[in-house]
Image (cartoon, rainbow, N blue to C red):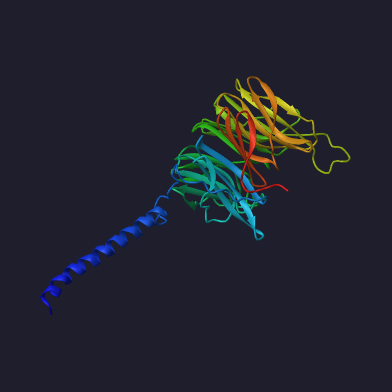
């Protein structure tokens, strides 16, 4: 063999090895940009990333929105396709709503609660009906996993976390038993209280680990329960019409709001129970009706959200129109909004900054003292 050729062989091997190393480095960098393995934290869009437009349709039903700040939030729901439904998870970041990787568990999300930017809970039922099993998912860094619920737990209708380690949820009744209140502590959900009658709890709001309220419907007088001193105690509403409560939102242990339905006298042309609506305010240790609306015979409430300044928003849908009731500075206003088919959830990050989600793939934004339709890809015919 030529002496010069013999000297070049180690150099050629070194060049080939260096090339392979550079190729491997590029591949690893590419994997990191794509999010890596399932065990890694999912990469978040950068501030310069171009948001991907939403591709929702009129068969999309958004059920809950939770804002961590004016610049970040989450929404859940489900989307029908091929005679089946699929859970949907949206993320608001970089000034736009974008589709996030949904949970792999196939269920109907009802509510989402985020305890930090990277940890949260999604809950609902195996279907969108009552008398079905409840489903609860815990998410950390974008990875959602089902958690074990007590046997016989029905569809989760509301949830409130006071910290990453403690929270409450209300569940509908099933054939296995009445509506329940669940308590999350020491890493597990357990039944803390069971309804003594056939009422159904729909909402829960906790001001601390030792004080909160749960509300619902049934038994002709609604269901309102106060948690204090480690015990749930029934509170009867001082209202002769026996309204049902669908939502309760507390600002503090001494101030809060509730909203519900008022049954109206039956008329011969009614094909269902006619209802008006009422809003209650909790102050000075008492619940008092502060707003009634019986202008239409079939009025339905959607989401309700209190403002840090003491005001409240309540969505309202009736045969005569759709919009919001807004209480601020001591007076009520009716606020128009391009609601398509009902609002299910609201979230405010400031007096003039809020979001609402609902049926028919709709997201509404509140800014500059008005509600506008956020583009989601779903267009009403």
Residue 12, visible in the rendered structure = yes
Rendered position, 82 above or below 313: below
Q: Give the percent coordinates (x, y) of residue 155.
A: 61, 48
Between 343 and 255, the one nearer to me in the picture: 343
Vertical placement of residue 304 versus 55, above or below = above
- Which residue is the extreme one toward the bottom? 1
Residue displayed at 71% across by 26% down: 291
Q: State which quadrant residue 314 falls in.
A: top right
In the figure, residue 282 lies in which quadrant? top right
Q: Nearer the viewer, residue 261 or 330?
A: 330
- Could you say where residue 176 lies in the image, as x and y percent from the top left? 62, 51
The quadrant the N terminus occupies is bottom left
Horizontal arrangement in the rendering, residue 318 relative to residue 362 (left or right): right
User: Does residue 183 sit above or below 278 in this rendering?
Assistant: below
Identify the residue shown where x is 29% and y is 60%.
22
Q: Please name whichever residue, 28 or 229, is drawn nearer the observer in this view of the structure.
A: 28
Say whether residue 62 is left or right of residue 277: left
> What x and y, as percent, mark residue 49?
46, 46
Displayed quadrant of residue 259: top right
- Spot occupied by residue 380 in the image (x, y as percentages of width and height): 70, 47
**Which residue appears farthest toward the right when viewing the image?**
268
Whether residue 160 appears in this view of the structure is no
Question: Total number of numbered labels?
Answer: 0
Q: Residue furthest left?
A: 3
């Amino acid at each position: 063999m030529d002496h010069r050729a013999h000297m070049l062989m180690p150099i050629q091997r070194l060049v080939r090895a260096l090339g392979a190393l550079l190729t491997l480095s590029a591949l690893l960098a590419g994997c990191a940009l794509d999010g890596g393995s399932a065990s890694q934290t999912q990469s978040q869009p950068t501030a310069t990333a171009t948001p991907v437009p939403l591709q929702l349709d009129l068969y999309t039903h958004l059920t809950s929105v939770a804002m961590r700040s004016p610049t970040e939030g989450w929404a859940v729901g489900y989307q029908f396709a091929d005679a089946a439904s699929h859970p949907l998870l949206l993320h608001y970041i970089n000034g736009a709503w974008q589709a996030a990787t949904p949970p792999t568990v196939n269920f109907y999300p009802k509510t989402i609660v985020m305890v930090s930017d990277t940890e949260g809970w999604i809950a609902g039922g195996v279907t969108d009906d009552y008398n079905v099993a409840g489903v609860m998912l815990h998410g950390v860094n974008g990875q959602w996993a089902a958690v074990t619920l007590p046997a016989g737990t029905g569809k989760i209708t509301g949830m409130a976390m006071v910290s990453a380690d403690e929270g409450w949820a209300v569940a509908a009744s099933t054939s296995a038993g009445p509506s329940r209140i669940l308590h999350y502590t020491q890493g597990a959900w357990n039944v803390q209280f069971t309804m003594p009658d056939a009422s159904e709890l729909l909402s829960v709001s906790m001001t601390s680990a030792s004080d909160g309220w749960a509300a619902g419907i049934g038994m002709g007088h609604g269901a309102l329960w106060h948690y204090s001193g480690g015990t749930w105690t029934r509170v009867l509403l001082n209202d002769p019409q026996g309204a049902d409560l669908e939502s309760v939102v507390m600002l503090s242990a001494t101030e809060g709001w509730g909203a519900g339905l008022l049954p109206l006298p039956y008329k011969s042309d009614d094909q269902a129970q006619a209802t008006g609506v009422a809003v209650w305010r909790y102050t000075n240790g008492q619940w008092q009706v502060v707003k009634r609306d019986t202008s239409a015979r079939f009025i339905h409430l959607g989401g309700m959200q209190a403002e840090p300044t003491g005001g409240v928003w309540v969505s309202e849908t009736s045969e005569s129109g759709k919009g919001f009731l807004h209480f601020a500075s001591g007076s009520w206003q009716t606020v128009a909004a391009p609601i398509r088919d009902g609002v299910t959830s609201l979230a405010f990050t400031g007096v003039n900054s809020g979001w609402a989600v609902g049926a028919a793939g709709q997201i509404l934004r509140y800014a500059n003292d008005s509600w506008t339709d956020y583009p989601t890809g779903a267009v009403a015919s």
